[in-house]
């Protein structure tokens, strides 16, 4: 075994201790190796060529199990774990969070990730996994829950935040019809309670979100009076379509300033 191969294996062994779910960033590696970014990048490139690690995306790497032979393909990484490294600061939300919490049985090919970073493309593929990446500037961590995927800690929006996010951006959950169905499922399965929903509502990013939320409460959660009152006070002015992607307006709920342009599910 050559000196280069031994050196690359040694680098990989040191990086294994700082990887999360088998993934690490250039910054993680620089800290672990005590090197500058330039020197670390050179060492990582050598390890990639030797087959001990693979480059997932610029600045993000996956470590191959040290007991396997150099060049052996790495196992497909968990898409949530990859997202935490590639799109940080971020959380898993929208239709992916809805599926995680049992709000929908519909399967989506891509993982929806909410990030504060500017992304040039909203649809991308990393490490064989498809992502829909959306930007949201809120910095609050309220309503974000840590879950473990293997040995990696990942943030996902809880039920309340998932629903309020979808009230602001119905496309995140697959459209207005999916939003209404997910809200009804959350109520029917006791997955959300008024106090938690009120906390989520206080962090809503827009008055339009509160208008849609108030409408859903009227229809499916009429006992949540404190949440309804908060939405009524803060929904803002103007009118929005319940589903912005549907061109027709439908009838108008003047109470909530929302055009009812979808077919709502029944209890």
Image (spheres, rainbow, N blue to C red):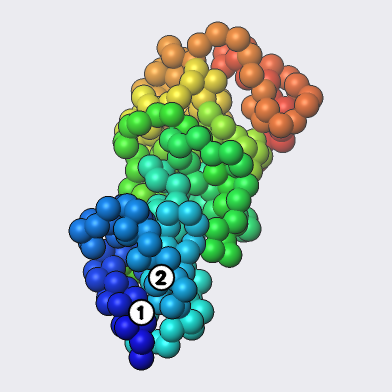
Residue 54 visible in the shown view: yes
Residue 159 visible in the shown view: no
Q: Of residues 224 and 33, which is closer to you in this image?
A: 33
Residue shown at 58%/38% (left/top)? Answer: 120
Residue furthest to the top in view is 237
**Which numbered circle lies on residue 39?**
none
Q: Is residue 50 above or below residue 221?
A: below
First along the sequence among labels 1 and 2: 1
Number of callouts in the render? 2
Whole-percent x, y for residue 163 in the image: 48, 38
In-image side of 90 versus 7 (left or right) = right
The quadrant of the rendering that contains the C terminus is top right
Q: Is residue 254 above or below residue 249?
A: above
Q: Of residues 105 and 136, which is closer to you in this image?
A: 136
Query: How many C-alpha atoms fall within 10 Å of the one at disc 1: few (<14), some, or many (≥20)?
Result: few
Residue under label 1, please give it. 4
Whole-percent x, y for residue 33 in the image: 23, 62
**Residues under labels 1 and 2: Cα distance?**
8 Å
**Which numbered circle lies on residue 46?**
2
Q: Quadrant of residue 197?
A: top left
Whole-percent x, y for residue 64 in the image: 40, 76
Residue shown at 27%/53% (left/top)? Answer: 36
């Amino acid at each position: 075994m050559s000196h280069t191969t031994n050196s690359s294996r040694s680098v990989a062994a040191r990086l294994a201790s700082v990887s999360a779910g088998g993934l690490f960033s250039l910054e993680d590696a620089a800290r672990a190796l005590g090197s500058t970014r330039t020197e670390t990048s050179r060492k990582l490139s050598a390890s990639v060529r030797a087959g001990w690690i693979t480059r997932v995306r610029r600045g993000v790497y996956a470590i191959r199990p040290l007991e396997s032979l150099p060049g052996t393909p790495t196992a497909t990484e968990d898409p949530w774990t990859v997202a935490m490294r590639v799109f940080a600061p971020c959380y898993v939300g929208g239709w992916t969070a809805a599926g995680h919490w049992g709000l929908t049985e519909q399967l989506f090919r891509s993982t929806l990730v909410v990030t504060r970073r500017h992304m040039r493309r909203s649809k991308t593929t990393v490490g064989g996994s498809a992502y829909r990446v959306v930007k949201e500037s809120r910095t609050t961590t309220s309503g974000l829950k840590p879950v473990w995927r293997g040995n990696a800690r990942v943030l996902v929006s809880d039920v309340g935040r998932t629903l309020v996010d979808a009230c602001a951006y119905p496309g995140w959950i697959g459209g207005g019809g999916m939003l209404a169905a997910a809200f009804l499922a959350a109520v029917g399965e006791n997955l959300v309670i008024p106090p938690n929903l009120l906390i989520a509502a206080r962090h809503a990013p827009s008055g339009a979100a509160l208008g849609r939320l108030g409408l859903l409460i009227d229809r499916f959660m009429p006992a949540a009076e404190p949440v309804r009152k908060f939405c009524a006070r803060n929904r803002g002015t103007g009118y929005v379509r319940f589903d912005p992607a549907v061109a027709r307006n439908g009838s108008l709920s003047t109470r909530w300033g929302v055009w009812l342009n979808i077919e709502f599910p029944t209890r």
